[in-house]
Amino acid sequence: MSGEEVEAESDEDVAADEPDPDAPAASEAANENAELFGVWDVTEIAYEDPSTKRYMTVTPIAHTMGRHASKQFQKSEISLVERLINRLMQTDENTGKKQQTTRIVRDAFDVIHERTEENPVQILVRAVENAAPREETVRLKYGGISVPKAVDVAPQRRVDQALLFISDGVANATYKSSTSAAEALANELIAAADYDADASYSISQKEERERVAAAAR
């Protein structure tokens, strides 16, 4: 074999090893095999509520750098875990502390797994499904009189409200308390997943809102 042929083969090998700049960053198979926080599998999550399944996306990516912010309702396309992280940040003290809040959620998932021996992502999905209100009230004005009226809640708003109730429950549990945020989040998610209205703030808020709506029918 001549020196030119050897050089040509070596050039071909180098070209084969170099990544294609036009190729996607990762294949679908690689995304499917990825795990949330490098630990939790998200490929076999079960959904019990068909109405909210479309609006609860579970992916192994917990930080999308705000790619959904430029398009209306694009939030339903990002991971439910990241939406929980973003909701926990929406307080005066924690605004913008994404890495700190991510560590809190990661530690809470470890606590959930130690207590329940289940996938904490599945616990989160079940908690959101249980805490999502199905009915609420709006105010209708007839002349100078304001009358409450019961209405059904849209599926996307149901998920939003469930995440709000969960984050409010964590904030209340940690306010002037020695309970850590990760511990409070784990307690809230486990109680909501078990539909324990006595221990879960989010479940109690959901039942209260539905009770008021039932009275306004």
Image (cartoon, rainbow, N blue to C red):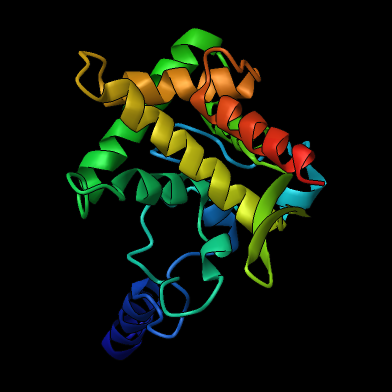
Rendering quarter of residue 141: bottom right
Pick out the residue farthest to the bottom.
4
In the image: residue 13, left or right of residue 36: left
Foreground residue among 192 and 135: 135
Q: Is residue 52 left or right of residue 50?
A: left
Q: Is residue 115 above or below residue 167?
A: above
Residue 171: x %, y % from top left: 32, 31
**Residue at image point 26% right, 47% down:** 91
Which residue appears at 28% of the width and 26% of the height?
A: 181
**Residue 176, can we see it?**
yes
Closer to us: 197 or 65? 197
Image label count: 0
Which residue is nearer to you in this view: 197 or 70? 197
Q: Is residue 45 visible?
A: no
Q: Quadrant of residue 104?
A: top left
Residue plotted at (37% across, 83% down): 21
> Looking at the rendering, which quadrant does residue 147 occupy?
bottom right
Q: Would you say 106 lies left or right of 118 here?
A: left
157, above or below 70, in the image: above
183 is higher (above) or lower (below) than 32: above
Residue 213: image location, x then y, percent: 72, 42
Q: Position of residue 57 (x, y in %)?
A: 60, 53
Q: Residue shown at 31%/83% (left/top)?
A: 11
Q: Assign the N terminus to one quadrant of the image.
A: bottom left
Farthest residue, direction top: 115
Closer to us: 65 or 145: 145
Q: x%, y% of residue 14?
A: 31, 76
